[in-house]
Image (cartoon, rainbow, N blue to C red):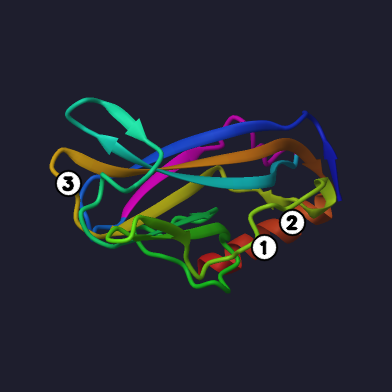
């Protein structure tokens, strides 16, 4: 299906959830990696989400969310290859690449994954998620309240490589992506 043009590399994007109960979006530009004329695409091998507390007054990060939120919290996030605006996609949407959720029991000092176990480790090149769109979109939401001068941040780390697709494979992926957009 695909022939690798590069080794694996990492793309990252951070999303600030500055206000609670507000959905935010960020995008990653893939224009330098995707080329329609050469049937060049991005093969996504793995997606990791990292949630961190951020102290806006002292400009530093904390890897635990306890101390950032002052109530129980639910944090959700998704990565897609079509622009959902500030909406979350249904699990059966072909544009959905990866998603996750984190629950925080602030009272008992417990952080745990939510009910979202979407596979975000795609494996070898022939199992990778092929993307022919020129952008990826990260959406996030925090349902909680923050301690003064704090907010949550989500970082997505994407392990990818540039690949060349056959004409048939390029067209199949482009048609699937276009169909998802309707």
For label 1, the residue is 175
Magenta region includes residue 159: no
Quadrant housing residue 91: bottom right
Residue nearer the viewer, 142 or 82: 142
| Residue 147's disc number | 3
* Secondary structure beneath label 1: helix
Q: Say which label, 2 or 3, has the lower sequence index.
A: 3
**Residue 109, position as x, y percentages in the image:** 35, 55
Q: Is residue 81 left or right of residue 138?
A: right
Residue nearer the viewer, 25 or 35: 25
* Secondary structure beneath label 2: helix
Q: Is residue 72 left or right of residue 154?
A: left
Question: Which mark is nearer the camera, 1 or 3?
Answer: 3
Quick one: which residue is furthest to the left in this view? 148
| Residue 23's disc number | none
Q: Is residue 178 above or below residue 159?
A: below
Magenta region includes residue 26: yes
Q: Is residue 26 above or below residue 89?
A: above
Range shown magenta: 24-38
Q: Is residue 82 above or below residue 26?
A: below
Quick one: which residue is furthest to the front in this view? 108
Spatial separation of the CA atoms under disc 1 and disc 3:
46 Å
Q: Say which label, 1 or 3, has the lower sequence index.
A: 3
At label 1, counting other C-alpha atoms closer than 10 Å, the crowd grade (few under 14, some 14-19, many 20 or more) is few
At label 2, counting other C-alpha atoms closer than 10 Å, the crowd grade (few under 14, some 14-19, many 20 or more) is some
| Residue 171's disc number | 2
**Residue 22, position as x, y percentages in the image:** 24, 58
At label 3, counting other C-alpha atoms closer than 10 Å, the crowd grade (few under 14, some 14-19, many 20 or more) is few
| Callout 2–callout 1 Cβ contact below 8 Å | yes
């Amino acid at each position: 299906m695909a022939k690798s043009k590069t080794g694996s590399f990492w793309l990252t994007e951070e999303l600030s959830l500055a206000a609670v109960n507000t959905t935010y979006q960020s995008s990653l530009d893939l224009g330098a990696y995707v080329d329609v004329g050469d049937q060049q695409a991005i093969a996504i091998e793995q997606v990791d989400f990292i949630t961190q507390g951020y102290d806006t007054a002292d400009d530093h990060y904390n890897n635990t969310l306890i101390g950032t939120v002052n109530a129980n919290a639910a944090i959700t996030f998704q990565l897609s290859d079509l622009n959902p605006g500030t909406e979350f996609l249904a699990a059966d949407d072909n544009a959905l690449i990866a998603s996750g959720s984190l629950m925080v029991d602030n009272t008992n000092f417990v952080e745990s994954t939510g009910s979202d176990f979407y596979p975000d480790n795609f494996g070898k090149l022939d199992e990778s998620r092929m993307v022919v769109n020129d952008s990826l979109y990260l959406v996030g939401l925090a349902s909680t309240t923050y301690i003064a001068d704090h907010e949550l941040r989500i970082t997505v780390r994407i392990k990818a490589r540039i690949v060349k697709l056959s004409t048939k494979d390029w067209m199949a992926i482009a048609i699937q992506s276009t169909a998802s957009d309707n």
